[in-house]
Amino acid sequence: EVKRDPKIQVARLKLPILGEEQRIMELINENEFLILAGETGSGKTTQIPQFLYEAGYAEGKMIAVTEPRRVATVAMAARVGHELGLTSKEVSYLMRFEGNVTKDTKIKFMTDGVLLKEIQSDFLLSKYSVVIIDEAHERSVYTDILLGLLSRIVPLRRKRGTPLRLIIMSATLRVEDFTENVRLFRNPPPVVQIDSRQFPVTIHFNKNTYPNYLKEAYRKSVKIHTRLPEGGILIFVTGQQEVNYLVRKLKASFPYRKDLDYSKLINRNKSVGEVDAALDSEPDDIESDDDEVEKEMKRARKARRKAKQKTKTLPKINLDDYDMPEDDGQADLVGNDVDSDGHMSDSDNEDYLTPEIKACRQPLWVLPLYSMLSSAKQARVFSPPPVGARLCIVSTDVAETSLTIPAIKYVVDTGKKKMRVYDHVTGASAWRVVWTSQASAGQRAGRAGRVGAGHAYRLYSTAVFQHDCPEHHPPDLCRRPVDDLVLTMKCMGIDKVVNFPFPTAPDRMQLRLAEKRLETLGILEKAEARNKKDQEEMLKVTPLGKAVSAFPLLPRYGKMLALSHQQNLLPYTIALVAALTVQEVMSGKPDSWPATGNTLLLGDPGVLLRAVGAAEYAHSMGEEELFCAKYGLREKAIKEIRKLRKQLTSEVNLSVAGVDASIDPEMKPPDDNQARLLRQLVLSGLGDQVGKKIGLDEVKQGEDKRKYKYAYHCGELEEPVHLHSESILRKVIPEWLVYQQMYETGGEGKKKMVISNVTA
Ligand code: ADP
Ligand code: MG
């Protein structure tokens, strides 16, 4: 029996989903699969687990809820426990490195990766009576794989006589990938749509799009706070650093002091004098998280006092009838503290404290929100701000659909998010700031309409929205290089990747080719079919493959790294892989990099390695620019390579304990033995990309033999492939070679295939 706090019961009853409890529970009882689609804030995450609990689904077995984000895992477990009047012993959470699950746990929130791990040791998920896949619209790789696996586990559980229910929850109505995919669900599962109250949200686009979206976000928030009626502000930026930066800036601009009674501020014009006097006194209690903020606030206070001598009266604004002025793009409130790359630094002056800011007496209650925030700090976003202060939350996209923050009236949307972007040559990935999808923009704007009519300020133009924001981003699983996906899934013990019931399947041909490639590279190997029905060949991960999968690279490059544990080769291999990833490093002629020492042994990668090593040294001497110009290196490419080397080095340090691979600007060129071994490493990774010289005796009569001077047979290609015109191996023209890249050049009628970065 559940004993809920009466206050909680009142809040619950306001959620439209409560009225649907009976219908939803009937559908769950009668169906093994159910899709539940409802607006963010409609009560899916907090209420469905409670319905199931009250219906007895936690008796004997557990209720599982998966979340793609850590922040939601913790927050929702706490909330559901609180609403049910249960402790964290019964409503618990589990994620990598952290959790509070006990033997008494009834409802278990976990990250999707954790449930996937559990499937590897207990394929039937026998501990659970029901699995809820939350936030399925996010289409995280793990969620997609979980859905595929569960579509098979559920029927197996039925056969065993211990049925398992699967509930897929989505914040959008776009669920065709789940319902219209007969490989996933032969019979489409029923879809329940939960209506929710949503008030109108007016969308405002900027006339211009400025590269410095942080500065814009600050500017817009200041305008909202100083000129617009009461109501919480929610600002979307891309990451933790940006969140902290804006929080600091906004707190310093509109500080909150615990020793002041701001309640009188609600009626601003009456009490200015009083608060003025108070602001002049030294504060004894300041709401702050760290010294940094303290310092900022002292600066702000000093500026405030100075400014007060000039501005004694508040600007008169009719708060009920106020139109945001069109963006003029002139006011530049933040100054130069954010450079054009979006890097952040705090300026030492107070230029950004304009008279308007200084005149504003109302504090802004600014809170950060991002995935790695401690649970205690996360919880603060759900509490109302102190009396007289305006709530302002600076968040990453976790506030888009994962967490519903109450009382937001204004949304400030930078239109940006961080996305993992893969280099399709090496598979190295990096987090890049990209435009959000139009769908995300819609979700973000929607956050302003939960409590009343709201406003969403998009800090970019309609042109950007139409041309640069895709309707949706493709699911993560389809953006990942297939070789990497195949290896990852095989490592999870999923043998039949090609036939896997993906919600959105990557190209099957590509998957097959990837399997073949990985087999050639010794990362997968044939295994005995388990039974006669399994006629299809099974490929399993080799021990080498397991080691390779630890590296954040395409398996072929991971293999090079995995094999470079000897003779101090790792730093060279990292530099080499980084250099091979970046396009067009050398703009000059190969002659500017003469084949001295053992460079020729490694071919083009050897030249690259030498160039990178020398450029790094020049950089350490502060002469990079000169050096690049002199030797025909593209400076931007060299900088990119350095970034990648650093990233790979730190990731390798993480995945291979005990290896210290820091970047050494004094790294000597490899000695002859190392160069020979590096050549073997290059071969080990590119061994499926082999070329054999076309003999001149093979050239058909009447054809110009000169055209075949640098021509090779490559793989199953019939046409000749030519050595890149700047390849150092044109001096040697080896009989056999491996190449990193093959591509087509030349226009109509002049097309030819070219290979580059070759090693004899
Ligand atoms: P959905 O999953 O459909 O997006 P939720 O179940 O997360 O919706 O939220 C339902 C309601 O519960 C929202 O109004 C939200 O603000 C509220 N809520 C969620 N978590 C908390 C919390 N920790 N404290 C107070 N209210 C909360
Ligand atoms: Mg939810």
Image: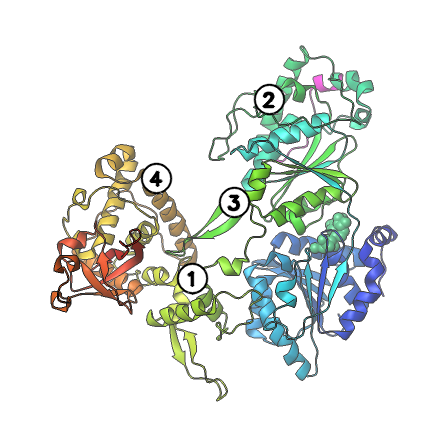
Residue type, label 4 = Lys
Disc 2 versus disc 4: distance between alpha carbons?
38 Å
Question: As drawn, is 264 to the left or to the right of 712?
Answer: right
Residue corresponding to mark 2: 299
Question: As drawn, is 226 to the left or to the right of 590?
Answer: right
Q: Observer-nearest residue: 68 or 306?
A: 68
Looking at the rendered structure, the secondary structure element under dot 2 is helix
Q: Nearer the observer, disc 2 or disc 4?
A: 4
Disc 1 versus disc 4: distance between alpha carbons?
29 Å
Looking at the rendered structure, the secondary structure element under dot 4 is helix
Residue 287 lies within the magenta run: yes
Residue 429 lies within the magenta run: no
Mark sitting on residue 636: 4
Residue name at image x 58 percent, y 31 percent:
216
Q: Nearer the observer, disc 3 or disc 2?
A: 3
Disc 1 versus disc 2: distance between alpha carbons?
48 Å
